[in-house]
Amino acid sequence: MTTREPARPVTGYAVLGLLSLRPWTTYELAQQVRRSLHWFWTRAERRIYEEPKRLVDHGWVEAREGWTGKRRHTTYAITDAGREALATWLGTPAQVRTVEDESMLRVFFADAGTLEQLRARLDELAEVTRSRLEELATMTEELLADGGSFPDRLHLQALALRRQVDQETDTLAWVTWARRQVDAWGSATDPGGWDTGRVLREVLADARA
């Protein structure tokens, strides 16, 4: 099989990356996605049971049938062509980073609702973010304790964890600030004496820093 045609979607490469570590069943792949990729590539969770079969059709993965007791299972393993495709993809520019954040959608359109709703959504976001930080802390403690399942990749996991924790702490700092700001508003459509211009000038200064 040729590797000239790139696999789409990008989730295919995410699955190839996991399979480059060792063969997995789809159940095991789903566990690994939940532990790692879902933090920065949520689409992998939605497509984890479809992608391996598609990659088999592409010649980048092979399926091996086996048994665990009386239960039949399929284990997927990356092929040489799959490794070549993964390496080729790693050498190409990444797509423009995109963000899908329902919490921010609700903030952006908060003037269609009430101030109480906006405050509640900010409080929810703070709670979720604290929970995510605790989960990341637990993962990091486990890696420090035993090196995880792939200790030879610990340096890459450390890079990714640093990025994710920074994102969550930034979110928590923002939501704490935002909650304090909206407490002074009269309603979701009337910020009262809130100095919008000052905030925008601060935003501009930070963006240009």
Image: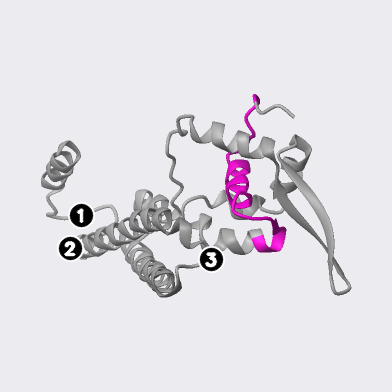
Name the foreground residue: 75 vs 121.
75
Q: Earlier in the sequence, mark 3 or mark 2?
A: 3
Residue at horizontal 35%, vertical 53%? Answer: 163
* In this view, 147 is above or below 2: below
Residue under numbered circle 3: 149
The image quadrant of residue 32 is bottom right
Q: Which mark is residue 191?
A: 1
For the residue marked with disc 1, what is the amino acid? Pro
For the residue marked with disc 3, what is the amino acid? Ser
Residue under numbered circle 2: 184
Q: Earlier in the sequence, mark 2 or mark 1?
A: 2
* In this view, 142 is above or below 206: below
Name the foreground residue: 168 vs 186.
168
Q: Earlier in the sequence, mark 1 or mark 3?
A: 3
Query: Horizontal and vertical percent for residue 39?
Result: 47, 57
For the residue marked with disc 2, what is the amino acid? Ala
